Image (cartoon, grey):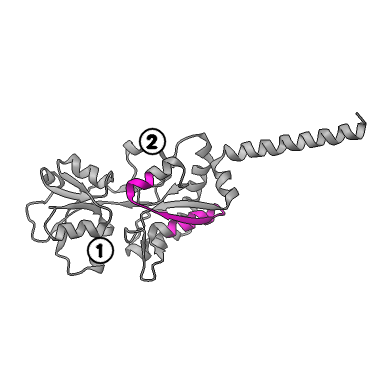
Amino acid sequence: MKKTSFIKAAFAFAAVIAVTGCQKKASGDFLARVQDKGELVIAMEGNWAPWTYHDESNELVGFDTEVGKAIASKLGVKAVFEEGPWDGLFAGLDSGRYDIMINGVEYTEERAQKYDFSDAYAYIRTALIVQSSNDTLKTFADLKGKKTANSISSTYTQLAESFGAETSGVETLNETIDLLRSGRIDATLNAEVSFYDYMKEHPEAEIKIAALTDEASNVCIPIRKGAEYETFKAAVNQAIAELRADGTLSKISEKYFGKDISK
């Protein structure tokens, strides 16, 4: 073989090794893959005001929607939203259909066995909501034997069941409140801020908060477990820290909740 041909072959081989190495690095680093495709696919329900919902123009808006856009921007990519029912969001996250899920997800030890979680970006208390005329349900302990409704596998359903309530599954907050107002269920559990938002839109609704959890829950972002997601998790946490420090989270919270739930 001529010397020049050998040198060309050597350079070609080195180039192949370099490209292959970069591909392996990218394929083994989830953050690199997200940044390489230039978009972050975010799963959310799209029907849970004021977290994620459609406005009068049918545009997807809400607290989590704007948080998702802000985090994607910090990662240097575009936010792409995919909507679906609550339990389907987790299934899509598991299968890799979605990169991330931002939908008012509360941290629980049970969920932490399956997912890693970002730092909290919001804090909420759970409200026990009943008809205004109901004076028998005053505490969560009074739920034993009572009928409730919430999204299947949500923390609200789990909490109701822990107090002995009979639960049924629905897809939206409006459906839940309709069941409550018609007397088909005795109570429902939901975020305190979601109750206030509902009452702002439906001031005639004869419902009230009977009790609130003592401590606020941490609202975080579930992330798939594994070494390839470590840099992605770190980047998301960094984004949350910067958005809190520069006041973005507070601003978005005030816009949709009328109060700052980011602290």
Q: Whole-percent x and y of residue 256?
A: 35, 64
Query: Hey, what amino acid is under mark 1?
Result: Tyr
Q: In front here: 139 or 149?
A: 149
Q: Whole-percent x and y of residue 238?
A: 50, 48
Q: In front here: 69 or 83?
A: 83
**Residue holding disc 2:** 114
Secondary structure at badge 2 equals loop
Residue 198: mark: 1
Q: Quadrant of residue 222?
A: top left
| 191 vs 8: above or below | below
The N terminus, quarter of image: top right
Query: Hey, what amino acid is under mark 2?
Result: Lys
Q: Residues within 10 Å of mark 2 (few under 14, many from 20)?
A: few
The residue segment tinted magenta is 66-90
Query: Distance from label 2 to label 1 (Cα)?
Result: 32 Å
Secondary structure at badge 1 equals helix
In reply to whether residue 70 is colored magenta, the answer given is yes
Q: Is residue 117 visible?
A: no
| Residue at x 33%, y 59% (from the top left corner) | 47
